[in-house]
Image (cartoon, rainbow, N blue to C red):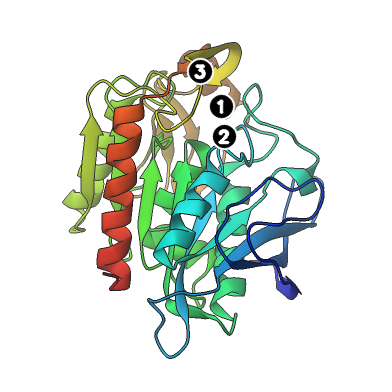
Amino acid sequence: MRGWAVLRGIGLAVGILAAGQAPMLAWAQTREILEFTSPSRNGPVTVKAELFLPDNASGGVNGRMPAMVIHHGSGGVSNTREYAYAREFTKMGVASIIPDSFTPRGVKNTVEDQSTVSTNDMIIDAFNALKAAAAHPRLDPARIGITGFSKGGGVAMRTGLEVIVRRHAPNGPRFALHVPFYAGCDTIYHNMRTTGAPMLVLIGGADTYVGPERCVEAVEHMRAAGSTVDMIVYPNAQHGWDGTGKAWSYPNGQNFSRCVYLQSGNGSWTEQTSGVAIAGPGGKTIEGAPQKALAGCRFNGVSGAPDAEVKAQSLEALKGAMKAAFGLK
């Protein structure tokens, strides 16, 4: 993993932010910036994550409070999602860490081209944010969890797998809780054992963007590996059920809901829908195979819709998981 860097503190109260920043909330808090170096396809970049510290946290241990990394999806950081959850966490006395994986890489969104910022890039950002947060004097390194949405939901899930932790953060801190929302679950490793930290997977049964069966299958593989994973399927919920406004669709958005990448015991990979072997033993990529596999499983057209009832239910489920993992009342 690339190195993480400095903390730059900016004291704030009553939700006053610097110009150009999304509004927060009328609760006393302090805003700081965490900075760290992460990779991109064009070389190393400096990634910034906003840290919001409740001023009157009641769940502190030895003066340190719990925290949640909130990782955005393909649309980037949004006031109606990432900042909205941060507002809820502030009420609970939980700090929020919001990495922006897109801006430093010169990307506004990845809806029409998911390769511009890879899930792997975002996973490294998440571990770097965790490492920086764990060193913060006001945060409890043993009580830092992660939640994320869609592409960021995949990050929240995969950072809880032993195979990913060993690859990216073998000697670093680990997340204490994982709560992925409508995640992309197209990658099934040979060993899906988790780190043992609590994981709650939230799925929309009517989600045609990522496909609910993919995440159900991923959870089944984690359980088969001996891990305890909780799962809630909201039968009629579409992608982005916790959003605002009206139903939406993007005809040019890349859809991977038919893609399933399965790893064998020898390290080889096969995309199940196309039947294309994309990597041989040891994981060495077969030239031209990934593109051939995508041609057989990926298509264009994504959609979703908000659902106020499911939004409220999933928020309570998230809060319940946080209270249990962090020892909050």
Q: In this rendering, is residue 109 above or below 135?
A: above
Residue at left 47%, top 87%?
A: 63
Residue at left 57%, top 39%?
A: 285
Secondary element at image label 3 = loop
For residue 236, the mark is: none
Residue 103: x and y in percent read 76, 44
Quarter that holds the N terminus: bottom right
Residue 156: x and y in percent read 44, 51
CB atoms of marks 2 and 3 within 8 Å? no
For residue 286, the mark is: 2
| Label tally | 3
Instruction: Tell me how far mark 1 sits from mark 2, CA to CA.
Output: 5 Å
Residue that mark 1 sits on: 289
Residue that mark 3 sits on: 298
Instruction: Tell me how far mark 2 sits from mark 3, CA to CA.
Output: 19 Å
Secondary element at image label 2 = loop
Using residue 298 as the reference point, say whether residue 41 is left or right of it. right
Q: Nearer the viewer, residue 144 or 299?
A: 144
Residue at left 33%, top 65%?
A: 195
- The disc labelled 3 sits on which kind of residue? Arg
